[in-house]
Amino acid sequence: MSIVTKIFVVLTTILALVIVPLMIAYVHNTAGIKGELEDVEQRRAVAVKEAQIINAQMAQTQNQVARAVEEADQARQRRLNEIDDLMTQITSKQQQITDLQNSLDQRNAQINTLVAGNEQSGKIIQMLEEELGEKRDRLVKADRQNIELTDKNQELRVKVDTMNEQVRLLQEKLAGTREQLVEIEQQRRHGVSGDDETRPVPAVRPIRGMITNVREVDGETFVAVNVGSNDQVAEGMLFIIHKADQYVGSLKITNVDLNSSAGRVTLTRGSVRPDLEVMASDF
């Protein structure tokens, strides 16, 4: 074997010894990157699910309140139109009353003239008295209708005032709902409850569970869930309470056991009860 061949064999052996550790490190790094990519994809899926839940609740609440405001405005407008019609009828009846009163005064004057001027005009007087009685009846009827229309007008005005108050309350509810939805969105983005100034502990991975018990204490709602420290739940962690795609409330964990934990409901948009799902993420 020549010297060149020996040198080539030695160099080939050295190169093999260098490449083998590099290949092992490359394979190990590739497996780690795949695991990180799978973890990122899982977190992204949880974020998309939370966004879908909150967006669906926001759209549903805004549509319901907007529809209620629109219906209240339409009802109020119908009442205002009825009031205008009644005012027109009242004006017409008042004019009829005035005309009947003038006609009555004329007939009384004619009767007085006939009685004073001619005692033999009994038939004419009788006819005029009958006409006078008829006009009196019409006058009484017109007065009664005027009273009824006035009462109805007052009733409709009360209804319109009630409608105005309902519209105002609905508008306030809409504004409050929008503020709550903004608060919910801020909680989703920043993980801070609306009535708690401390930042919740983020989950190290997505956690899902279910409510097992609900209790009301001093006006606050406390719940127990079926996930605990074995599931990497920690005190201060923030969970979203939901039913399918409907957002129900937010839960902040205060006590943690191995397989269960408990916490306080910090925000509600529906009835919190057992068997509802809870979900926490790392953002």
Image: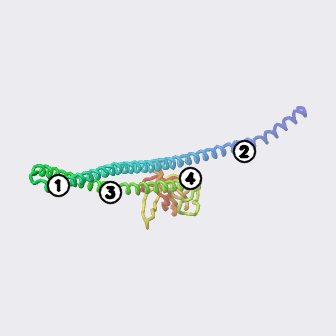
Q: Mark 2 or mark 4, which has the lower sequence index?
A: 2
Q: CA distance from mark 4 to mark 3?
A: 59 Å
Q: CA distance from mark 2 to mark 3?
A: 89 Å
Name the front one of labels 3 and 1: 1
Residue under the point 42% across and 62% down: 215
Quadrant (top left/top right/bottom left/bottom right) for the N terminus:
top right
**Pointer 2: what residue?**
25
Q: CA distance from mark 4 to mark 1?
A: 102 Å
**Pointer 1: what residue?**
113
Q: Secondary structure at mark 4?
A: loop
Q: Can you tell which mark lies on residue 248?
A: none
Residues tagged 2 and 3 counted as in contact (Cβ below 8 A):
no
In the rendered image, residue 107, in percent from the top left (x then y), is placed at 19, 52
**Pointer 4: what residue?**
281
Q: Secondary structure at mark 2?
A: helix
The amino acid type of the residue labelled 3 equals Gln
* In the rendered image, the vertical position of residue 235 relative to residue 103, given as above or below: below
Name the front one of labels 2 and 3: 3
The amino acid type of the residue labelled 2 equals Ala
**Pointer 3: what residue?**
154
